Amino acid sequence: MKNVQKSFDAQEKIDPQRFIRQVGKRPLLSQPKYTTPYEPELFAETFGPPEMEMNNRRRSGILFWNFVDQDGKAAFSMFAEFPSGQKAKKVPVCLSARRSSSTAYLWTADRLAAVESGDELPLLVGAAKFVVSRVC
């Protein structure tokens, strides 16, 4: 993820099972702490296809992924807002956390980097077929 304004200990390793994907809940859309460019295939293979919430009146939408901690408490959301007709690759994904945003950021960055570099196999091979590449 880019646009990080804090420094982190690059040696800190976050347990890959620290957070669990949660579906069916609204995303946490508070002030984002971090952003990164949206790469639909990488995000889909790493975290699964995003959920989508549409605003039909404005013809815009939000793609999102929610995560809980191991106790089942809401931890953070990643989301991308799409103005009407904008292509998915042109928007950033934002990370918004209830607490411990640096841990959520490091966990997310570790997962994306490991799948992108081939150090870990994607959890959902072929999930990119289900990614929305253009909203509306």
Image (tube, rainbow, N blue to C red):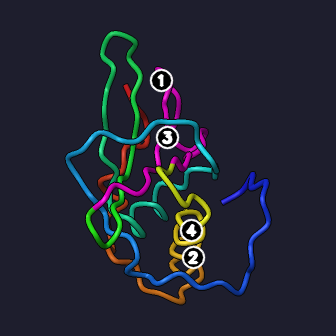
> Quick check: is 92 in the magenta stretch?
yes
Query: First in sequence: mark 1 or mark 2?
Result: 1
Residue that carries the numbered disc 2 in the rendered image: 110
Q: What amino acid is at disc 1?
A: Gly
Tell me the magenta residue range.
73-96
| Residue 44 horizontal/vertical position (percent) | 39, 61
Residue occupying the point 31% across, 73% down: 70
Q: Disc 1 designates what residue?
A: 85
Circle 4: element type: helix
Taking the spot 31% from the left edge, 26% from the top edge, the residue there is 54
Name the foreground residue: 9 vs 2.
Answer: 9
- Position of 60 with respect to 30 (left or right) is left
What's the residue type where badge 4 is placed?
Thr
> Dividing the image into 4 quarters, which one contains the N terminus?
bottom right
| Tag 4 residue | 103
Question: Contact (CB < 8 A) between labels 1 and 2?
Answer: no
